[in-house]
Image (cartoon, rainbow, N blue to C red):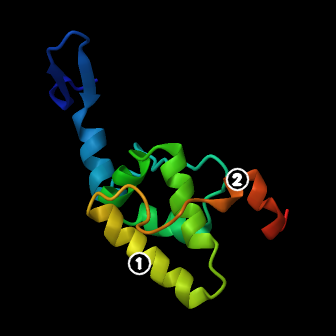
Amino acid sequence: MHYENIEFYPMRNAIVYFKKDIENATHQNNFSNIMTKKIETGILHDLPEDMEQVLTSDEQILANWNNLTPIQRNEWICWVTIVKKSETRAKHIDRMVNDLKEGKRQPCCWPGCPHRRSNAEKWFKK
């Protein structure tokens, strides 16, 4: 073991990391060996692939997304996926990205996910 590659940070619990390994990982593939991007989901809807790609493309957006409550994430997912046209869906994804960057926590002017209301179930496929 090469002790010059280890840095110690005195804290309540000593944190030790291997400096060269992290530096190599940074240069090789931006920490993909060390860190994985975890995406939190909603309470009812699964996260579609197109939204997942957009969320993982920017760390700020992903951090803002993961800081939302599960119900707020569910509202964004439903708001994006409930539309019929692909053009409208793309516009909703773009607006979601911009709103998340600005720190907004839910879609503006959205009455809420109808899938959570039992009296609205008749309007949706099961």
Give whichever of discs 1 and 2 has the lower sequence position.
1
In the image, residue 57 above or below residue 90 = above
Q: In which quarter of the image is residue 59?
A: bottom left
Residue found 38% across the figure and 45% down from its top: 67
Indicate the amino acid at tag 2: Arg
Residue found 26% across the figure and 11% down from its top: 13
Is 102 on the left-hand or right-hand side of 42?
Answer: left
Residue 76, x across and y down, in percent: 51, 62
Label 1 crowd bin: few (<14), some (14–19), many (20+), radius 10 Å: some
Residue found 35% across the figure and 50% down from its top: 63
Q: Which residue bears the numbered disc 2?
A: 117
Q: How many marks?
A: 2
Q: Can residue 19 be seen in this view?
A: yes
Seen from the viewer's position, the closer of residues 2 and 20 is 20
Indicate the amino acid at tag 1: Asp
Marks 1 and 2, Cα distance to the nearest angstrom? 27 Å
The quarter of the image holding the N terminus is top left
SS at mark 1 in the image: helix
Q: Which residue bears the numbered disc 1?
A: 94
In the image, residue 101 above or below residue 89 = above
Camera-nearest label, 1 or 2: 2
Residue 116, x across and y down, in percent: 68, 52
Seen from the viewer's position, the closer of residues 35 and 119 is 119
Residue 111, x across and y down, in percent: 53, 63
Q: Quadrant of residue 19?
A: top left
Residue 107, x across and y down, in percent: 44, 65
SS at mark 2 in the image: loop
Indicate which disc residue 4 carries. Answer: none
